[in-house]
Amino acid sequence: MNMLELIEKKRDGGVISKEEIEFFVRGVTDRSIPDYQISAFLMAVLWRGMNDEETADLTISMAKSGKICDLSDIPGVKVDKHSTGGVGDKVTPILLPIVSSFGVPCVKLSGRGLGFTGGTIDKFESIEGFCTSVEPSDFKNKIERFGLLLGGQTSDLAPCDKYLYALRDVTGTVPSIPLIASSIMSKKIAGGSDAIVLDITCGSGAFMKDIESARELARRMIAIGKLAGKPVTCVMSSMQQPLGIMVGNILEMQEAVSVLQGRGREDVKNVVLTMASEMLKLTPFGKGKEIDELKKLCNEKLENGEAFAKFGDLVLSQGGVLQSDGTPVYVDKSFEVMTVYAEKDGYISSCDALSVGEASCLLGAGRMEKEDVIDMGAGIRLYKKIGDKVSRGEELFTLYTGTKAPVSDDRIDEALFHMQDAYVISDSPVTAPKEILEVIS
Ligand code: URA
């Protein structure tokens, strides 16, 4: 078998056999295929696509490229969650403690942010002392003691995806449905959970720009789950504008903490409660219960402080530092660079998630390149969201930077330019977009 023939076959719209896919995955994992041929193949897949069988073969082969976690000696149904990525997405730090406070074991393996989307691992690492490298051999012990854990993708878990994802990010080959489906599902299968709930973000600040592509991605991942014997539920959420009002690592953790303290905004709560309820629905506790009833029960966990207490357990169990009021100590602070005010009266008709994500990245909250150091304090606070009424002179947004990775004035100017582009004020009233677009299982 040779890689050039494989590239040419896909380039010309051919179907790749299981043996050929295994050859490709082996060659990526042991580095015997050079990056330029891997990249050419990825680009051919992006243009020509893959059928269901090819996508499933790629997923299973990628999952088997490293260790498959065996969580079978942890009692109970283990439900995992993953998001296809977004701007201001602080769902995981709120959702894990809620689900865990029902006694459901939660093992969450998360990724870092790349490009304009944030990553859960980076957000947790904004907490002083929090350690995200948990060895699979420690999972059982941690779950028995604390009920939940949050770890990064270790080098022996789906290593082929780790390598492919980094290459995709720098070759313009991320937004391919079969490549996203296999990337996510290979990690979820290797992670060893019994059932999976996926947040498929949809809109300018997501890889899936429209609902049709989001549905197709959902269909593929549900089909892969079926093949692997794991029930999959897909929640399609809007990423037309950022989720909540804070974007950036420390800022998003602070917003997540305020939701956990029962003070959160409705848009964030709605996505969190929907995802948490769908996760519970896949466990014996939630079986037979209506989603609205589960949402109500999850909300009670926010209001009675149980979820906040669980969050504290999670932080302490992984070496993080808390203040006496239970809120985290962060590795840095956010310093205001400037606040921008509305220039006219009207209604917010756009708060474009992609532009906000790019602006936040420029301020230092995300990586422009793989090796970049993140400025944990950097980010943006939004005062107005789509549908809000605004008066001339009212605050629209504030830009922040931290102290750990200062950026140049040019980058701050560019961030400001993106933010001014993100906001549009119209004269007539605008309806706020729904956060949850569809749920498919
Ligand atoms: N998240 C992943 O883990 N992989 C992708 O390809 C896209 C989002």
Image (cartoon, rainbow, N blue to C red):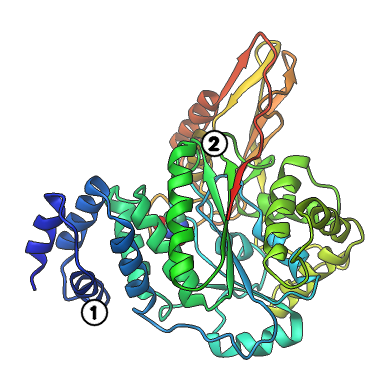
| View extreme (top): residue | 427
**Residue 314, visible in the rendered structure:** yes
> What amino acid type should be assigned to the residue bearing mark 2?
Ala
Marking on residue 264 = none
Q: Where residue 261 appears, x then y in whole percent?
A: 85, 55
> Which residue is at a point 7% across and 63% down the rendered structure image?
5
Judged left or right of residue 116, residue 381 is right
Q: Quadrant of the C terminus?
A: bottom right
Q: Where residue 203 appears, x then y in whole percent?
A: 51, 37
Q: Compute the Cα span from label 1 to label 2.
A: 38 Å
> Which residue is at a point 61% across and 54% down the rendered structure image?
249
Residue nearest the viewer, comparing 378 with 267: 267
Q: Is mark 2 within 8 Å of ligand 1?
A: no
Judged left or right of residue 426, residue 20 is left
Graded by Cα atoms within 10 Å as few (under 14), some (14 to 19) or many (20 or more), the crowding at tag 2 reads: many
Marking on residue 30 = 1
Judged left or right of residue 121, residue 333 is right
Graded by Cα atoms within 10 Å as few (under 14), some (14 to 19) or many (20 or more), the crowding at tag 1 reads: few
Badge 1 or badge 2: first in the primary sequence: 1
Ligand 1 - quadrant of the structure image: bottom left
Instruction: State yes or no: discs 1 and 2 in contact (Cβ < 8 Å).
Output: no
Q: Where residue 270 appears, x then y in whole percent?
A: 74, 45
Judged left or right of residue 306, residue 424 is left
Q: Where residue 136 appears, x then y in whole percent?
A: 54, 85
Q: Quadrant of the N terminus?
A: bottom left
Badge 1 marks a residue whose secondary structure is loop
The residue labelled by disc 2 is: 353
| View extreme (right): residue | 304
> Which residue is at a point 75% across and 14% down the rendered structure image?
391
> What amino acid type should be assigned to the residue bearing mark 1?
Asp
> Which residue is at a point 8% across and 70% down the rendered structure image?
2
Q: Is residue 339 above or below residue 37?
A: above
